[in-house]
Image: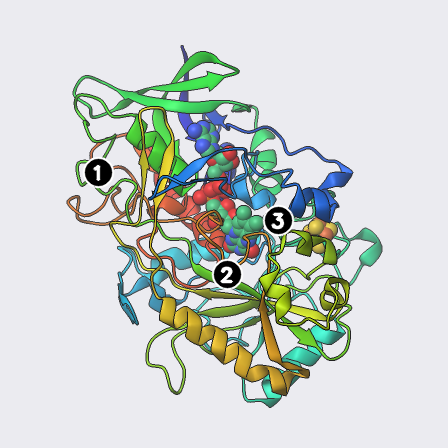
Amino acid sequence: MDSYDVIIIGTGAGGGTLARHLAPSGKRILLLERGGWLPRELDNWLTESVFVDNRYVSPDTWYDRDGTAFQPGVHYYVGGATKMYGAALYRLRKEDFGELRHQDGISPAWPIPYDELEPYYTLAEQLYQVHGARGEDPTEPPSSAPYPHPPVSHEPRIQQLADDLAAAGHHPFHAPCGIMLDESDPPNSTCIRCANCDGFPCLVHAKSDAEVLGVRPALEHPKVTLLTDARVTRLETNEAGTTVTDVVVDRDGSEERFTADVVVVSCGAANSAKLLLQSANGRHPNGLANGSDQVGRNYMFHDSTAVLALSREENETAYQKTLGLNDFYFGADDVEYPLGNVQMVGKSQAAMFRGERPRETRLAPEWTLDRMARHAIDFWLSTEDLPRPENRVTVDRDGNITLSYTETNGEAKKRLYEKVKSLLGKLDMNPDHLIHRFAYMKNDIPIAGCAHQAGTCRFGADEATSVLDTDCKAHELDNLYVVDTSCFPSIGAVNPALTAMANALRVGDRLLERIA
Ligand SMILES: Cc1cc2nc3c(=O)[nH]c(=O)nc-3n(C[C@H](O)[C@H](O)[C@H](O)COP(=O)(O)OP(=O)(O)OC[C@H]3O[C@@H](n4cnc5c(N)ncnc54)[C@H](O)[C@@H]3O)c2cc1C
Ligand code: SF4
């Protein structure tokens, strides 16, 4: 059986970033990824292939709490979900690391303060080449360095939106974007600033994803090995149940086994929980590292709504994700509890609407879908989803995932929508229409839209209420770590990837000390 210093299972935001951080150590590192390389092909940028045919979505079937089957919006490739992500690379707010009172209850504190993660946020912003501007967003947490790249400029209609918001007394800011755009030198810019970024793979590898900036740089080191199409099915332990001994892999139907001093799970929140639950044994009867009964629980994925407003003039923007607004993040003049983040989402295209449900167009019967797409200005509204023990991932004997989920903070989500709608008249938009949009996570982001999944193996100081310790090592095992969004005790209301990357770097430093 091949033996390594470290095995990393999953190569997305958590695993891919960790791989890059550990690679220069010269240790023997094995990356196990259930998917393959995402093919570079014209379909990467074809709206119908990506949004209508779901070409890059896994054929997995999961079940909701009533046993109804659905196809989750998950992507199994080298780089994981970051291959498709919008690369909006936000830090959580400093306050998100403390306890926050929400309309539906408490968002729990993280076991580490913001200040402990701050240097790793800075490093993650550098590794992932984030473009942004400090000092524009009043909710922005403190930072020890400027963004490594200047903000991506607004195109004219979005600049007008920024100006109109500012004139209305708001604080729009340049959103942090992970795209390799050099506006000062367009002929040599890797990114061509196209309209097919958010929810699409990048054909020219100019998106700051975990394949391009995590796995590929890691593989430049001779002792790093990647096995693709290698689905880990089970972790086995020594008799005492204290150490993971074997990592069991299914490759094209045949079983292979690997061993390592340190095993890191980073399969995404649902699949990491699944792997631990499926690895139950005599010492861990309810699932590996699950003495607390917390594995799979506290699933969160943001209360998100993709909406479009209809601009009076056509919106000719190509790359729309340059603006954010956090003025309602912690509440509003007339609302005491947090509402969430407002940002832009990739520009609507008529081809995307083919999957739209008819009731949405009833709101604007005089508008053809094509005209709607041309005038659309598209927003992404995210409200924090609170961790609930009953919102959970479970796995049956055949390995099928059931995702039991009931929405939290629904009132705050509604209030955020109303806040944005009330602004439209001041923003040169049709004041009556703020239309729910069929987007990559589908309208109203039902349970299948699990892009922002988090929270199933939360970390904490108390082993009775958490799965992982503050170093993200399983309380009950001496060589098992989890570095994906599973570890989040709460999710905040901004996108999760940069936090997963920063935390993987933090855990990576602990591992470098351990394996030195
Ligand atoms: C369309 C879309 C848009 C998004 N936009 C943004 C955005 O703009 N900003 C942002 O911050 N976040 C965004 N996200 C979310 C972000 O991509 C995720 O939060 C992040 O990638 C999660 O990182 P992770 O390491 O937890 O999991 P993933 O990145 O999903 O990685 C998990 C990896 O594990 C592999 N795997 C799973 N099971 C196994 C197994 N049993 N054996 C081996 N390998 C396995 C998977 O194939 C995958 O490669 C978006 C996501 C999607 C889908
Ligand atoms: S905007 Fe840039 S990074 Fe995004 S898909 Fe287009 S070329 Fe790639």
* Distance in Å between CA atoms under marks 3 and 2: 13 Å
Residue at mark 1:
475
Amino acid identity at mark 3: Ser
Which residue corresponds to the image point at 41% horizontal and 66% vertical from the top-left?
93
Residue 426, placed above or below residue 211: below
**Residue 332, position in %: x, y?**
41, 82
The residue at label 2 has a CB less than 8 Å from ligand 1: yes
Residue 90, numbered label:
2
Q: Nearer the viewer, residue 170 or 133?
A: 170
Q: Which label belongs to residue 255?
A: none
Q: In terms of secondary structure, where does tag 3 sit?
A: loop
First along the sequence among labels 1 and 2: 2
Q: Position of residue 220 (x, y in %)?
A: 61, 30
Residue displayed at 25% across by 44% down? 469
Instruction: Evaluate whether residue 125 shows in this view.
Output: no
Is label 3 within 8 A of ligand 2 (CB to nearest ligand atom)? yes
Amino acid residing under circle 2: Tyr
The residue under label 3 is 208
